[in-house]
């Protein structure tokens, strides 16, 4: 069977979906993209990208260690990410939204140190496994070939769980994010919500890592949300754009990866980055027009 | 302009027989074992504008936290709307001391105001095409407070891109949106320039009358709010003095409270001006 791209996109899609592994890749990618679009939006708004990145990096030794021990890599991802979330939530800053006051610098130093250690551990586990190099690449940069039916099911359950919880805590979480002190005075359990959100973030990162690899989680988690935030300041519309961008980027990335010899992670990341650049440029142009439009020059007052 | 806005000072019997909004009886506060203030007794009546003044570290923010029930008292009782402090916080609009929203905060002012309405309720904000009568009621009230504070022009911009004065107006609208009986404002004028300090003060007084809400406002500098106040509460030397501006803002009282010579002058319009108060930043300087 030959695999080739032609400009008849319908037949291309049909060709892609005729392979079971691609069907699974598309299913997993779609689930992960929707959840990333939503959770990522809150993460960017809360300025917790650093925490999210840390979980992704800590997921890597988890998956590598699990593989070395002969356990399912997914268990390693989920276990380590959740553990990382609990540790961050227990830090003195409580993993609360950085808000307008900026991140706690000591907290970020602790987290940074942990990240380096985690990467080193992951590398060690890969060597102990005497793994071939492609195993390492898949863990770090993702692969579209290896997603099983069982994995898709796990991703679906985790994803539905994340979205369901967010549907319940969404509004108070937004309040605690934008205005923690007022929210607290109104009786919102700010600290509990922060910890809860970190756990959701951990589940999302662990799930996404299995598709995009540990290092490229951010293509789906940050870039679509950041793109949406450039385009609108409305929370509802922002969430919708974020999800749309994440899903489109994933589908396109997986499609291109299918026809090209390069990793899926590269394509998804590149597309997400291009989308972000376009949004930045668009926002810049719109703002410029906004400033120019009223265009009434200041009345000149003679100086006496 | 300020002379024209001046309101008659509340006479003590204007609210005789009306249940107080806030009542402290021989209250003391202690933080980490240190007595901050004690034997503080005062009442705030409905729709009264009271400023809380005093040197740094006198316990002004502690007083607000006590009234919100966030800080337990060491002695005495605090009643808010007839119940112990902390029970009626849904009827208190609180504006904490803060710096401005970061310029990159990409959320609209109107969303921030709306969070004041139902931000503490579980669930998700519903999109426009699914909204019911409750959402319409909320939207109407949000529009009403936004127009009350004069923020229609910028409520749909990202709040990070609004000026300090604009942000402060939006936050006052947020505090007001649930029709509170008491507004608690912690240094709302602190990061504003002189023009905005006086226009926001005028706005707070107007809100106080229009919405029939009592206001407790902590301030650093008495001058911008002085024309609009009903009473002032000075915290110093571990105690409190309360009274109308004419009673409390005198050279003798202030010099005693601040331990430093302070003059109280009257300008052409009869307005009081405090000179030499150590905490007042002469002119418009920023806080160190």
Image (tube, helix red, strand yellow):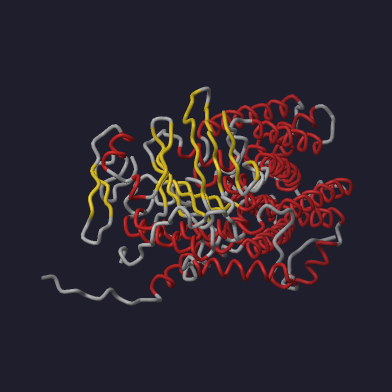
> Quick check: B63 above or below B157?
above
Q: In the rendered image, which quarter contains the N terminus of chain A?
A: bottom right
Residue located at (15% from left, 74% from top): A302
Count of numbered marks: 0
Residue located at (78% from left, 55% from top): A31
Left or right of A178? Residue A59 is: right
**A21 or A119: nearer the viewer:** A119
Q: Quadrant of residue B131?
A: bottom right
Residue A32, image x, y percentages? 75, 52
> Quick check: A242 above or below A124?
below
Residue B2, image x, y percentages? 31, 63
**B17 or B153: nearer the viewer:** B17
Q: In the rendered image, which quarter contains the C terminus of chain A?
A: bottom left
Left or right of B82? Residue B194 is: left
**B195 or B61: nearer the viewer:** B61
Residue A117, image x, y percentages? 62, 27
Residue furthest left as drawn: A304
Residue B263, image x, y percentages? 23, 43
Left or right of B82? Residue A69 is: right
């Amino acid at each position: 069977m030959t695999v080739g791209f032609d400009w008849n996109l319908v037949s291309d899609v049909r060709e892609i979906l005729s392979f079971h592994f691609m069907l699974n890749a598309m299913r997993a990618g779609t689930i992960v993209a929707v959840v990333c679009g939503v959770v990522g939006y809150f993460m960017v708004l809360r300025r917790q990208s650093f925490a999210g990145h840390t979980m992704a990096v800590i997921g890597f030794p988890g998956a590598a260690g699990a593989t070395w021990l002969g356990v399912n890599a997914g268990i390693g991802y989920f276990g380590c990410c959740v553990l990382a979330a609990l540790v961050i939530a227990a830090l003195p800053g409580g993993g609360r939204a950085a808000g307008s006051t900026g991140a706690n610098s000591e907290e970020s130093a602790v987290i940074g140190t942990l990240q380096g250690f985690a990467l080193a551990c992951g590398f060690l586990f890969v060597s102990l496994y005497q793994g071939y190099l492609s195993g390492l690449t898949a863990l770090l940069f993702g692969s579209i070939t290896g997603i099983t039916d069982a994995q898709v099911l796990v991703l679906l359950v985790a994803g539905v769980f994340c979205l369901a919880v967010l549907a319940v805590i969404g509004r108070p979480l937004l309040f605690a994010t934008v205005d923690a002190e007022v929210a607290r005075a109104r009786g919102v359990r700010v600290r509990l919500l922060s910890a809860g959100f970190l756990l959701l973030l951990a589940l999302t990162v662990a799930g996404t890592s299995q598709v995009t690899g540990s290092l490229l989680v951010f293509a789906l988690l940050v870039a679509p949300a950041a793109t949406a935030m450039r385009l609108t300041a409305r929370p509802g519309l922002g969430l919708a754009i974020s999800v749309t961008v994440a899903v489109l980027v994933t589908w396109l990335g997986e499609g291109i990866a299918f026809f090209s010899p390069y990793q899926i992670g590269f394509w998804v990341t590149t597309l997400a980055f291009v989308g972000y650049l376009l949004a930045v440029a668009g926002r810049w142009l719109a703002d410029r027009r906004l400033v120019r439009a009223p265009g009434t020059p200041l009345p000149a007052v003679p100086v006496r | 302009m300020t002379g024209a806005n001046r309101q008659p000072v509340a006479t003590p019997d204007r609210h005789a027989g009306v249940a107080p909004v806030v009542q402290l009886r021989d209250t003391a506060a202690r933080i980490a074992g240190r007595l901050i203030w004690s034997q503080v007794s005062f009442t705030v009546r409905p729709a009264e504008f009271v400023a809380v003044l005093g040197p740094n570290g006198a316990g002004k923010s502690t007083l607000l936290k006590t009234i919100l029930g966030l800080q337990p008292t060491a002695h005495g009782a605090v009643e808010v709307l007839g119940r112990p402090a902390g029970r009626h916080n849904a009827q208190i609009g609180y504006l904490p001391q803060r710096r401005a929203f970061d310029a990159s905060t990409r959320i609209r002012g109107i969303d921030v105001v709306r969070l004041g309405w139902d931000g503490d309720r579980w669930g998700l904000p519903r999109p426009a095409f699914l909204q019911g009568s409750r959402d319409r009621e909320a939207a109407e009230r949000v529009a009403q407070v936004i127009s009350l504070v004069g923020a229609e022009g910028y409520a749909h911009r990202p709040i990070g891109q609004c000026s300090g004065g604009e942000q402060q107006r939006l936050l006052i609208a947020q505090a007001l949106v649930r029709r509170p009986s008491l507004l608690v404002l912690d240094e709302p004028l602190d990061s504003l320039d002189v023009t905005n300090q006086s226009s926001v003060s005028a706005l707070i007084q107007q809100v106080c009358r229009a919405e029939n809400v009592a206001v407790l406002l902590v301030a650093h500098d008495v001058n911008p709010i002085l024309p609009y106040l009903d009473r002032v509460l000075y915290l110093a030397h571990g105690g409190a003095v309360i009274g109308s501006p004419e009673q409390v803002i005198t050279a003798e009282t202030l010099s005693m409270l601040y331990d430093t010579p302070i003059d109280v002058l009257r300008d052409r319009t009869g307005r009081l001006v405090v000179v030499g108060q150590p905490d007042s930043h002469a002119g418009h300087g920023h806080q160190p």
